[in-house]
Amino acid sequence: MEKGKKQNSVNKEETVIKINRLYKSFDELEVLKNVNLTVYRGENVAVLGKSGSGKSVLIKIIAGLLKPDKGEVTVLGKTVDKISGKELDELRLHMGFSFQSSALYDSMSVYKNLAFPLIMNVKNLTQKQVDTAVEEALEAVGLEDKIDELPADLSGGQRKRLGIARTLILKPEIMLYDEPTSGLDPITCAEINTLIIEVQERYKTSSVIITHDLTCAKHTCDRLAMLIDGAFLKIGTFEEVLNTDEEQIKKFFAYNFIQ
């Protein structure tokens, strides 16, 4: 694949995430208001919006970390807030969650950060199988030579890559990225954007990418969902959303630089 070039392999006949009439409030603050979204097999959907628009709340509801007030979220055919704790744990094995902070174990080496979730969730693996899985995940994110280092010895971009590798170790069907380029310099942002595309192509993942970074959205998404004040004002390709007549969306784009 040409580096950074988006290739489309979306199967619109198969839905992996379905969000229907979703509402979420905290006390008197309405965060999500009648949110609807469908994510298809093999599709990257970027949810774009300014800070405080409800993006992170949405991804936490998808992952079952928060419960909605009203509405329904279905992931791989399971209604997330209606299944048992055991079923939710099993469903999460099919979802990779790349946290904004990378959520690494600072006292563990790069190898142990990857081996730990694999050993905890997949029983009866041989040491050779664990080693092979760790090496494959590190190769996928370009960190093969960092296997014995500690997270503290890595750059911000390398820590992001390691966080993504740790989600890939279980070969998830769905990737959930929470602000994957936050706090990174432009060159490292471009590298992470390319990595997101490569993960989609190599692992055939479907992804929701939470971001306020227009460049990230432009280069990684098949479709873009524009979240303004807790509701999607426009869903479509990046160009379709960019060219809308909706004033609030035009203002958001006007104050951001697009490469």
Image (cartoon, grey):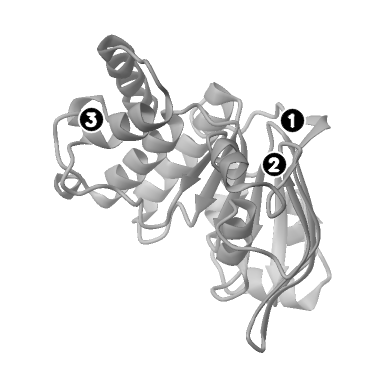
Nearer to me, 33 or 52: 33
Which of disc 1 and disc 3 is earlier in sequence? Answer: 1
Label 2 Cα crowd, 10 Å radius (few <14 / some 14-19 / many 20+): many
Label 3 Cα crowd, 10 Å radius (few <14 / some 14-19 / many 20+): many
From what the image shows, is residue 39 above or below residue 131? below
Q: Specify whether 235 is left or right of 258.
A: right
Q: Position of residue 33 (x, y in %)?
A: 77, 73
Q: Are marks 3 and 1 in contact (CB under 8 Å)?
A: no
Q: Specify whether 233 is left or right of 149.
A: right
User: Which residue is located at x 52 percent, y 49 percent?
Assistant: 177
Q: Are marks 1 and 2 in contact (CB under 8 Å)?
A: yes
From what the image shows, is residue 106 above or below residue 175? below
Instruction: Tell me the residue that label 3 is attached to.
Output: 111
Q: Position of residue 154 (x, y in %)?
A: 20, 45
Residue 222 is labelled as: 2
Tag 3: amino acid: Tyr
Residue 10 is labelled as: 1
Nearer to me, 253 or 123: 123
Q: Position of residue 185 (x, y in %)?
A: 34, 56
